[in-house]
Amino acid sequence: MKEKEFINIIKNTLHSKYIGDDCAYLKDLGIVVTQDSLVEGIHFRRDFATPYQLGYKSVMVNISDICASGAEPLYLTVSLSLPPDIGAEFVKQFYEGAKKACKNAEIVGGDITGAEKIYISITAIGSVRNRRISSRANAKTGYKIILSGNHGSSAAGLSQLINGEKQSKFINAHLMPDARIDFSKKLAENIIEDYAMMDTSDGLMDALAAISKESNVLMSIDFDKIPFDKDLKSFDNYQDLILYGGEDYELVAAVPEKYVQGFVIGEVKSGTGVEINYTDKQVLYSSEEIENKLFNHFKENL
């Protein structure tokens, strides 16, 4: 069973209108709320990342979700579960990295417990003041599909780490991502129409498929317009890294043409699924086909 199946079970059990986007939009409180967890052996290895890098990335993962909603990141709480071999220096460096990633947001509390391995769970809160909040269900035919930046670098970096490399620009992209705060702010403060936006933490194709499914539209993409570091072409599977590699933490949005920023990579059309237009062919992927190629958080991947 995969992550989305569990989410559907939870959503259908709770019958909650708040479950489905990167953040829960609590309109009556004027905030959005998100929570993400990182588990040793599933999302990271201690020999791959320093405590500082781990703290930094753990926070940035959550800030990215706030940005995907269009809200302003404000507050976070951090819960750590640590095994007996973890000492004070690890905790100090972890929180130094976490503080650096916060930028204008602030860590206001959390919890710390013992465990057999490291578990990190962070809750982030964002303000919706003077912002228009996005939803995966808001893509409309004729909207342009825009992207904030390069894809495939993080997955390439993880591949290098697994293969024993220690330092490269791709490894840095994997360990020290930056949430697209300015991209989100500019769009959410200026747009007056409904729009769809997600981060690409689980891969560009995952985000495109989710918007397609929730909005009941076809996401038509020109592969050659997707930005990526040209050195990715040294990897045999570079196209898969670009489309399916996760943890780039860029933003993809479907917006009216007058709000275009970043890179325009396609257009919303009538239909369903994700259509990739390559130089020599056009391929239509269903949500099920995309899901089968995506990162599965319920398997040990490291």
Image (cartoon, rainbow, N blue to C red):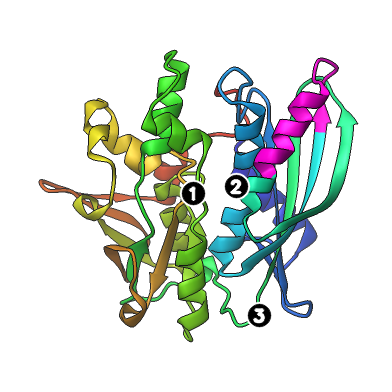
Label 2 crowd bin: few (<14), some (14–19), many (20+), radius 10 Å: many
Residue receiving disc 3:
129
Q: Can see residue 288?
A: yes
Secondary structure at numbered mark 3: loop
Residue receiving disc 1:
249
Residue receiving disc 2:
61
Chief SS of the magenta region:
helix
Q: Give the range drawn in magenta.
A: 81-98
Q: How many marks?
A: 3
Q: Does the magenta stretch include residue 94?
A: yes
State how far apart marks 1 and 2 are (Cα). Answer: 7 Å
Label 3 crowd bin: few (<14), some (14–19), many (20+), radius 10 Å: few
Q: On the image, which quarter does residue 114 sit in?
A: top right
Residue 277, horizontal then vertical, whole percent: 20, 53
**Quadrant in the picture for the N terminus:** top right
Secondary structure at numbered mark 2: helix
